[in-house]
Image (cartoon, rainbow, N blue to C red):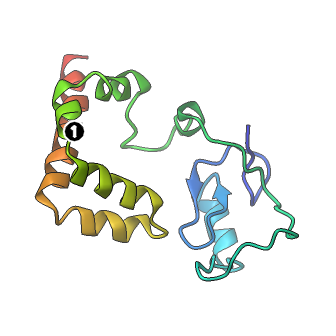
């Protein structure tokens, strides 16, 4: 389990968009932002540099422990995404898969999402994801 890179006390739930460190709260982000050193994409990583935070892989459970996020989706509803025939059909489209890879690998996720949301196919995918989890929410 990882700890917040700022306070080293709590499980981090967020990632700084500039330098990619993990932090647990708005208070930690405010403490961090003045000392933030943005990651430069053109500079190759220094193999001798020591990493000051844990880089082990994150799990869905790590991200779902946040109590003060208004828009979080419970794990059981997220699992419905994997069972949706409509989503599987959409994911057969190689253009959509490329769009998803582009967003996932982008340095600026916000900008990548804004660009992807200009694509009707991506909007259809996002709408279907919401429909899938919201339909189950209505039944709970």
Q: Which residue is mark 1?
A: 92
Q: Quadrant of residue 48?
A: bottom right
Q: Nearer the viewer, residue 19 or 68?
A: 19
For mark 1, give the secondary structure: loop
Name the side, left or right, on which 134 lies relative to 40. left
The N terminus sits in image quarter: top right
As drawn, which residue projects farthest toward the front?
94
> x%, y% of residue 32?
68, 70
Q: Residue at x 15, y 30 (%)?
A: 86
Name the side, left or right, on which 88 lies relative to 43. left
Q: Nearer the viewer, residue 90 or 26?
A: 90
Q: Residue at x 72, y 52 (%)?
A: 4
Q: Quadrant of residue 21?
A: bottom right
Counting the numbered discs, the total is: 1
> x%, y% of residue 132?
21, 30
The C terminus sits in image quarter: top left
Q: Residue at x 60, y 54 (%)?
A: 25
Q: Is residue 93 above or below residue 89?
A: below
Q: Residue at x 56, y 30 (%)?
A: 61
Local crowd size for mark 1, using a 10 Å CA cut-off: few (<14), some (14–19), many (≥20): few
> x%, y% of residue 6?
75, 60
> x%, y% of residue 8?
80, 51
Name the side, left or right, on which 60 lies relative to 101. right
Q: Quadrant of residue 134?
A: top left
């Amino acid at each position: 389990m990882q700890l917040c890179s700022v306070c080293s006390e709590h499980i981090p739930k967020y990632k700084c968009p500039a330098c990619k460190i993990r932090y647990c709260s708005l208070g930690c982000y405010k403490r961090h932002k003045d000392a933030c050193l943005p990651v430069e994409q053109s500079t190759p990583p220094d193999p001798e540099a020591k990493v000051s935070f844990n880089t082990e892989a994150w799990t869905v459970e790590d991200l779902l422990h946040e109590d003060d996020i208004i828009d979080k989706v419970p794990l059981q509803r997220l699992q419905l995404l994997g069972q949706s025939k409509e989503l599987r059909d959409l994911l057969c489209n190689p253009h959509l898969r490329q769009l998803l890879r582009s967003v996932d690998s982008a340095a600026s996720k916000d900008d990548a999402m804004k660009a992807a949301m200009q694509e009707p196919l991506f909007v259809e995918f996002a709408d279907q994801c919401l429909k899938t989890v919201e339909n189950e929410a209505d039944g709970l």
